Image: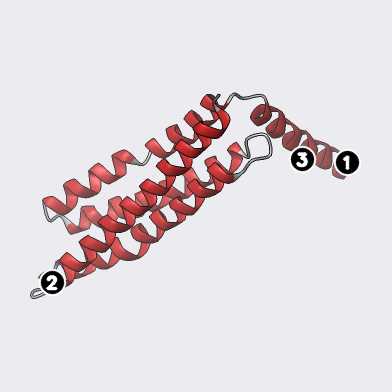
Amino acid sequence: MKKLAVKFLGVLSVLFLMVSCSGQNPVEYNNKIMNSLNKLQEDQKNMNSAMTSNDLKKAEEVRAKWEGNVNEVIKEITKIGDFKGDSSFKDATLKSLNQYKEIITVKYKELIDISSKEGTDSKQLQLLNEINNGFYEAINAVNDASRKFEQEKIK
């Protein structure tokens, strides 16, 4: 009986998710994804502030929190699901978020680690360029996917 109840709740959850996404209009769907992404802006501001003030301890705290927040947004967007069977916008967003996460977990970690060492200015500049280029690439990919989604779905 308990197994049956758990299966029923699982099926009910999936059905609820399908109905909630399929009943949405394209603008609501797009807004849900973009609002989820906007939650990460504060982390970026906090990182810029910590790095500008050369507070490397604070920068690492922000980086770790930011990484956790990216994981939460990935889960949130995954739960949003497809739009009436079309996963292209969601998939592009998740791909970009994973790229974003890689920057935060690897590139920022490395930048924070070397920022306290003498004679690493050229390496810092290289990492900052890689970080900025990676962020622009990820953001542009989401914006492109959003525009394409709007053009195809909003008529």
Q: Which mark is residue 10?
A: 3
Q: Provide residue 125's location: percent of width, then percent of height.
A: 16, 65
Q: CA distance from mark 1 to mark 2?
A: 61 Å
State whether residue 143 is above or below residue 155. Answer: below
Q: Where on the picture, by quarter, is residue 119?
A: bottom left
Mark 1: which amino acid? Leu
- In the picture, which quadrant includes the N terminus? top right
Q: Callout 1: 10 Å neighbours few (<14), some, many (20+)?
A: few
Residue at the (37%, 47%) spot, across then down = 140
Q: Which residue is mark 1?
A: 4
Q: Provide residue 80's location: percent of width, then percent of height.
A: 59, 37
Q: CA distance from mark 2 to mark 3?
A: 53 Å
Q: Which residue is mark 2?
A: 122
Q: Which mark is residue 46?
A: none
Counting residues from the start of the chain, the first of labels 3 and 1 encountered is 1
Residue at the (14%, 68%) spot, across then down = 116
> Is residue 113 rendered to the left or right of residue 142?
left
Q: Callout 2: 10 Å neighbours few (<14), some, many (20+)?
A: few
